[in-house]
Image (tube, helix red, strand yellow):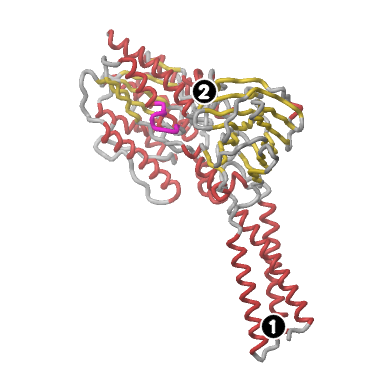
């Protein structure tokens, strides 16, 4: 028979066990609190056919939910989430917090063809609007909201959307203030979601109701749904412990009360260990880590910080003689290898283009670049012969991830494919236009030059389109090297009777001031080379800025959506049509 004092000790031990179990459970959930484990949402940014930087990390790491709310600005921003199920929605409630120069877009009435939404903005270039958009994200209709800066606070705000299908109207409320009411023919079952901008945008306490006020869905983004594993382990441990102690008490000559005291000491030690850890984890996960990266990516973060180091002591000497400007690019490449730039190049055309790395994270990144380049070359070998006929015009596109097509939802929606399709539609039976996508994500101009002169020239392009700026600024920022590389492209093309076309690589209007300044400097260098050799320079960056509020154009500061790539591709195609027709007349 268990004595009263022993029973009291057992109760105390059980209470401590339950409290420790709760703390371990929370720790476990916080460490596993990701959108992937949340399992309510799908990330449209991560579904692109050509991967985007940070898209998978946003979905699979803790940064998106680390403050126990949804951060749509994590991992380079412009994150786009849609709830996985279609619902009969009457009311959507949610809390939000927007940084200055940020926007939050709420998506609803969505299906495969189009969707509606409202944009709450604190960015000077983007107004507060209700809109209707097509499947690519192009705005077909925009209406201003009665929403001013005073209605949205610097901290948390509450929004409510009423979707009345019978009256065919939608109404919006921000902090209980009506800000808009519009006619809207709604779908019986619809998708809804959220899209952010470049800077931090937080969403929390999402609740969706039907017309009967029944809650169809709610998400507070607090913890992972992986709750049962640690709880089961602790419950099983408690049950086994109690069974053992009962067996000892009933069948063995053992001082049960003494053993209970020892067990109490053990669980108290466990409590004193877990409680400070629990407090630390709660504090840690109430703050966002700096930048895009979580603690799992410390090594990568350190590397990228080093990679993005700006060499401000480098400057372009415009007084160089023509002979100095035309000097061999390899001298600069050797210098950059000594300075620690990311890839070595061959010293002769007979050698391998790349020297494979040995060890370390930096070398792993180099190997990744090497593999990307090799995949591009293998793709060319598979798709194209190294001989052409008089009816074929080949255009080789030299660029990085933007030109490669990062962000397009399908291969056919990439910029280069859009160009090829429009050119062939224009020239029809006159020419067969082949657009060779020779872009390699992550590389810089002098690396691409080596690939071009050693490999791509063997495919005998008629036109060489060069779209380079971003990586040379962020990774190298050697103005003289960039100038000479562009010049070298032209001189090689001239020798091989290939027409050269320069394109200013575009960025989003949400690019940082430092980034825009650096990009402008690179564009100026490209224009100087173009002016010197009478090369056509296409101001694509300036052109894209005209369309900044045409729809959803950008996934981040440098990678375009399918809509952005369509706009850019059609503009470049128009310029190439003029170039080809002029060449035909000559």
Check the image and report above or below for 535 versus 513: above
Check the image and report above or below for 310 versus 296: above
Local packing at callout 1 (Cα closer than 10 Å; few below 14, some 14-19, many 20+) is some
Q: From where the camera sits, is residue 263 visible?
A: yes
Residue 410 horizontal/vertical position (percent): 41, 33
Which-is-in-front pick, marks 2 and 1?
A: 1
Q: Residue at x 60, y 32 (%)?
A: 108
Q: Is residue 115 magenta?
A: no
Residue 20 horizontal/vertical position (percent): 68, 65
Comes first in the chain, label 2 or label 1: 1
Residue 11 horizontal/vertical position (percent): 74, 74
| Residue furthest bottom in the image | 253
Residue 258 position by quadrant: bottom right
Q: Quadrant of the C terminus?
A: top left
Q: Looking at the image, which is closer to me, 112 or 509?
A: 112
Q: Looking at the image, which is closer to me, 403 or 351?
A: 403
The residues colored magenta run: 408-415
- In the rendered structure, the answer to whether residue 477 lies left or right of residue 15 reads left
Local packing at callout 2 (Cα closer than 10 Å; few below 14, some 14-19, many 20+) is some
Q: How many marks?
A: 2
Residue 577 position by quadrant: top left
Q: Are marks 2 and 1 in contact (CB under 8 Å)?
A: no
Residue 345 horizontal/vertical position (percent): 34, 37
Q: Residue at x 64, y 60 (%)?
A: 25
Query: Residue under circle 2?
Result: 520
Query: Residue under circle 1?
Result: 259
Q: Residue at x 24, y 37 (%)?
A: 350
Q: From where the camera sits, is residue 77 visible?
A: no
Q: CA distance from mark 2 to mark 1?
A: 75 Å
Q: Looking at the image, which is closer to me, 401 or 9?
A: 9
Secondary structure of the residue carrying tag 2 is: helix
Secondary structure of the residue carrying tag 1 is: helix
């Amino acid at each position: 028979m268990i004595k009263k004092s022993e029973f009291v000790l057992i109760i105390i031990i059980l209470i401590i066990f339950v409290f420790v179990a709760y703390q371990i459970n929370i720790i476990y959930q916080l460490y596993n609190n990701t959108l992937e484990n949340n399992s309510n949402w799908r990330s449209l940014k991560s579904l692109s056919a050509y991967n985007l930087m940070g898209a998978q990390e946003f979905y699979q790491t803790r940064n998106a939910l680390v403050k126990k709310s949804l951060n749509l600005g994590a991992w380079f921003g412009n994150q786009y989430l849609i709830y996985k199920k279609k619902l009969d929605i009457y009311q959507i409630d949610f809390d939000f917090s927007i940084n200055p120069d940020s926007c939050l877009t709420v998506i609803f009435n969505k299906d495969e063809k189009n969707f509606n939404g409202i944009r709450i903005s604190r960015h000077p270039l983007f107004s507060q609007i209700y809109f209707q958009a097509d499947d690519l994200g192009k705005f077909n209709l925009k209406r201003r909201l009665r929403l001013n800066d005073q209605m949205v606070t610097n901290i948390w705000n509450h929004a409510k959307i009423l979707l009345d299908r019978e009256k065919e109207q939608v109404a919006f409320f921000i902090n209980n203030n009506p800000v808009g009411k519009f006619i809207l023919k709604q779908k019986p079952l619809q998708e809804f979601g959220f899209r952010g901008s470049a800077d931090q945008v937080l969403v929390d306490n999402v609740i969706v109701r039907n017309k009967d006020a029944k809650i169809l869905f709610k998400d507070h983004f607090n913890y992972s749904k992986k709750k049962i594993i640690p709880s089961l382990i602790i419950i099983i441990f408690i049950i086994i412990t109690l069974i053992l102690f009962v067996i000892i008490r009933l069948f063995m000559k053992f001082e049960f009360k003494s053993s209970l005291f020892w067990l109490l000491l053990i669980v108290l030690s466990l409590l004193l260990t877990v409680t400070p850890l629990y407090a630390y984890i709660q504090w840690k996960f109430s703050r966002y880590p700096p930048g895009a990266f979580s603690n799992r990516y410390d090594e990568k973060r350190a590397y990228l910080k080093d990679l993005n180091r700006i060499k401000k002591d480098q400057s372009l000497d415009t007084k160089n003689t023509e002979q100095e400007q035309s000097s061999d690019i390899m001298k600069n490449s050797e210098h950059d290898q000594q300075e620690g730039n990311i890839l070595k190049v061959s010293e002769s055309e007979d050698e391998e283009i790349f020297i494979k790395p040995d060890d370390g994270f930096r070398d792993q990144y180099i190997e990744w670049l090497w593999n990307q380049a090799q995949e591009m070359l293998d793709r060319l070998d598979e798709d194209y012969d190294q001989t052409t006929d008089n009816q074929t015009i080949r255009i080789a596109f030299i660029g990085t991830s933007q030109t490669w097509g990062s962000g397009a939802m399908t291969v056919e929606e990439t910029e280069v494919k859009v160009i090829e399709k429009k050119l062939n539609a224009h020239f029809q039976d006159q020419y067969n236009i082949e657009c060779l996508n020779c872009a390699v994500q992550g590389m810089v101009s002098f690396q691409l030059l080596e690939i071009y002169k050693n490999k791509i020239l063997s495919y005998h392009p008629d036109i060489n389109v060069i779209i380079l700026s971003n990586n040379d600024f962020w990774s190298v920022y050697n103005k003289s090297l960039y100038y000479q590389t562009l010049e070298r492209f032209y001189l090689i093309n001239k020798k091989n009777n290939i027409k050269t076309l320069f394109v200013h690589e575009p960025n989003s209007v949400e690019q940082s001031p430092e980034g825009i300044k650096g990009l402008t400097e690179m564009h100026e260098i490209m224009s100087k080379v173009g002016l010197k050799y009478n090369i056509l320079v296409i101001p694509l960056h300036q052109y894209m800025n005209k369309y900044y509020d045409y729809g959803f154009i950008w996934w981040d500061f440098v990678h375009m959506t399918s809509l952005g790539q369509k706009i850019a591709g059609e503009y470049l195609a128009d310029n190439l049509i003029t170039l080809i027709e002029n060449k035909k007349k000559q």
